[in-house]
Image (tube, helix red, strand yellow):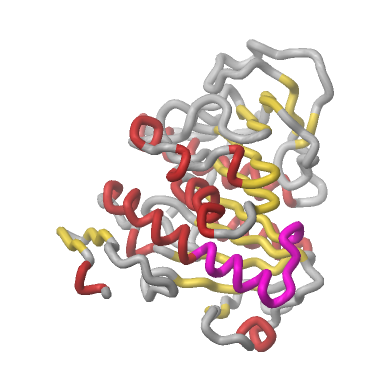
Amino acid sequence: MDMFDIRYWRCVIKKAAQCPNSDIKFFLYTPDTGTRRKRIDIKNPNALKYMGWNPHKESVIIIHGFNGTENKTPMTIIRNAYLSTGEYNVFTVDWESLTIFPCYLSALSNTRLVSRCSAQLYSYLTHHGALAKKIHCVGHSLGAHICGMMSRHLNAKQYKIIGLDPARPLVDSYGDAQFRLTRDDAYHVQVIHTNAGFLGEENVVGHVDFCVNGGTNQPGCKGHALRQARCSHFQSACYYAASILKNVKLIGVPCSNACPKRQGLGLLPGKVVPMGIKTPISAKGQYCVSIRHNKDCPFD
């Protein structure tokens, strides 16, 4: 079926809707194997058992964004944070060859196939005994939209999705609800905004949205304007990884529905909630988070 793909320069637009697909790979990491990845063949009914999957632990599916890959920062920072707890099976989706720079338009098109195949991974887990309440999807940038689009290919929507600065370019203008992350894609959708209005989506996307440090430019991100934007965009991944560590608490204060915003404006009375992995399912609305630091988020 690959003969029908459209290829230009180094870019590929996948025309086939067939899964599994050789350009979309799934890997498993466990607390026992650490950072030694094992590729999962979802056509093999015994793959999970032989690869060390523990059905009693929670599982997370991590999906990278444009010009990314599953084994480079900052996605590895999220992966390692989960592994450090000893409580998760960590699955990663690698679609690197379908989202290389400068092929953003083809990457947008390819998210449809990636979401279909990633939904197949999700169904593979539930078919082998994983509980939907014990699976959540974490996606950065275009990966956040892929997490949301997965629900279109499932019999029931997912339990929880965490969208890390969901991609904005062209998605805001041309992406309808079927091809972007929305609150309808899971019973609980959390979104962390760190470069809202430029590389990341603006305003409310999920059930609970966190606007960090005003939502646009993050402290510690230096250099020219584009590098600052990319650094801020990736900072959502580092903030989320920090929230997984047991000794880190990132607190959100209720605020008005606008992100980006000037820091300190629009705060409202109400109960504060932790941002990230510790956010309660009951949390709703928009929250502002202030994180003062001088470190940027490493990205490859």
Q: Residue at x 30, y 67 (%)?
A: 16
Q: Does residue 3 appear to the left or right of 138 in the view shown?
A: left
Residue that protrudes farthest toward the top in the picture: 265
Q: Residue at x 75, y 60 (%)?
A: 134
**x%, y% of residue 281?**
78, 41
Q: Is residue 95 above or below residue 37?
A: above
Instruction: Please check the rendered image and state whether residue 149 is part of the magenta-colored stretch, yes or no.
Output: no
Question: Picture coordinates of residue 171 (x, y %)?
Answer: 38, 37
Q: Read off the magenta span.
A: 118-134
x then y, percent, for residue 273: 79, 32
Residue at the farthest front position: 155
**Which residue is depicted at the point 18% across and 62% down?**
7
Q: Is residue 265 above or below residue 29?
A: above
Q: Is residue 130 magenta?
A: yes
Answer with the quarter of the image where residue 12 lies.
bottom left
**Nearer the observer, 113 or 85:** 113
Q: How many numbered badges does the structure rendering display?
A: 0
Q: Residue at x 56, y 33 (%)?
A: 205
Q: Is residue 27 visible?
A: yes
Eyeballing the image, is 229 above or below 26? above
* Magenta span dominant secondary structure: helix
Measuring from the top left, give residue 264's x and y in whole percent. 65, 14
Displayed quadrant of residue 185: top right
If the image is split into quadrants, where does the C terminus sit? Answer: bottom left
Q: Is residue 227 visible?
A: no
The quadrant the N terminus occupies is: bottom left
